[in-house]
Amino acid sequence: MNKQLQQAMWLQGNSRHFLGPNVTALVPLNLLAAAFTHSHSDASMRILHGYSDLGLVFGVYGAVVLLFLQSDALNKLLFALLLVGNIAFFVVNTWITVNGMGIPFGSQFHIALAAIFAANYFLTSRTYRSFTG
């Protein structure tokens, strides 16, 4: 299970670079997209949301691994909520990627995406450190 937890650490090694920017880069990119919602093209928006989908897939995988590693009921609840959040954001974000710009509350959605990426990274890192000492 330690190997799965290492993979949930966002695949930061050389083997993940063919997937595009690091998942941790999605936090500032989504914050910038929230600040400048109508200053980009439809194509760049679809690329950002496509990469965000990739980051959410890693978030779902990490939340599942972390959920199974927990013995404490409170931590299980925390990671179950994280899993549900990642799945919900994945569904909505995929819809946005396919249908394009022009959704209401786009700025707030980008801020929420940045928040869930930050939560994924923080909780995965914290759990990884507690398991590896």
Image (spheres, helix red, strand yellow):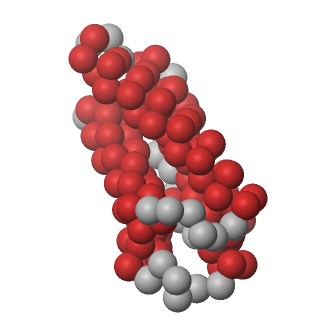
Q: Position of residue 41 (x, y in %)?
A: 65, 84
Res 21 → quadrant: bottom right
Answer left or right for 32 relative to 42.
left
Answer left or right for 78 relative to 47.
left
Res 129 → quadrant: top left
Determine the residue positioned at 58% across, 85% down: 40
Q: Is residue 129 visible?
A: no
Q: Is residue 21 visible?
A: yes
Q: Position of residue 133 (x, y in %)?
A: 25, 34
Determine the residue positioned at 69% across, 67% down: 100
- Residue furthest to the right: 98
Q: Front-most of 43 and 55?
A: 43
Q: Is residue 79 above or below residue 21?
A: above
Q: Front-most of 5 and 84?
A: 84
Q: Position of residue 68 (x, y in %)?
A: 46, 17
Q: Is residue 103 above or below residue 70?
A: below
Determine the residue positioned at 38% across, 40% down: 124
Q: Position of residue 85 (x, y in %)?
A: 45, 37
Determine the residue positioned at 28% across, 21% down: 75
